[in-house]
Amino acid sequence: MNKPYIGAADRNKEPIFKVLKPFLDKGEKLLEIGSGTGQHGIYCCEKLPHLQWQPTELESNIPGIQQWIADSHVRNIHAPLVLDVSSHNWCQSSYDFVFTSNTVHYMRWSDVGSMFEGVSYVLRKSGLFFIYGPFHRSGFSATDGNKKLNEWLQEQSPEFRIRSTDELENF
């Protein structure tokens, strides 16, 4: 099996890291929902050796994350856990941070709600939940790229789409 690679994850890892770093300097444990290949986690762990990063993913994507971890030199990224946000099988640990990247637009709206519910169980009271991805904002028109992505998402499933920040803030 070839190690999976996501070009967008490689391109956006540094901008994401720059935004997260001031917060991540102040905590020890992070849960990532929908880790994809694990590229973001490995990159952040290389730069923040104090941070314990727990990747999660659907079962079919776990081998790819394992390959990325095996090929890395980081020791603060844990073996990936299987997590389907719609299940009630969330890990029992508590975390300073929860991070998810490019997942919300690939979820049914009910699964977005399940994710928020699950995060409320694992995130410490003073913890932070970070969501990265394309979003619509009230009063701003969507970019051409986001319009095309949204059309493509709708072709994949009528339940997939770019969400508005207003929708997420009202959970």
Image (cartoon, rainbow, N blue to C red):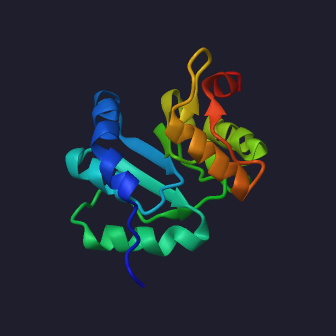
The residue nearer to you, when weighing 93 against 68, is 68
Closer to the camera in the image, 89 or 8: 8
**Does residue 19 lie above or below 56 as drawn?**
above
- The answer, for residue 107, to whether it is visible in the render is no
Left or right position of 133 against 116:
left
In this rendering, the answer to whether 64 lies above or below 93 is below
In-image side of 129 versus 40 (left or right): right
Q: Position of residue 79 (x, y in %)?
A: 43, 65
- Report the side of 159 relative to 130 (left or right): right
Q: Residue at x 38, y 66 (%)?
A: 5
Q: Quadrant of the C terminus?
A: top right
Residue 29 appears at what percent x and percent y?
40, 43
Quadrant, the N terminus: bottom left
Q: Quadrant of residue 119?
A: top right
Q: Residue at x 70, y 58 (%)?
A: 156
Q: Pick out the residue farthest to the bottom.
A: 1
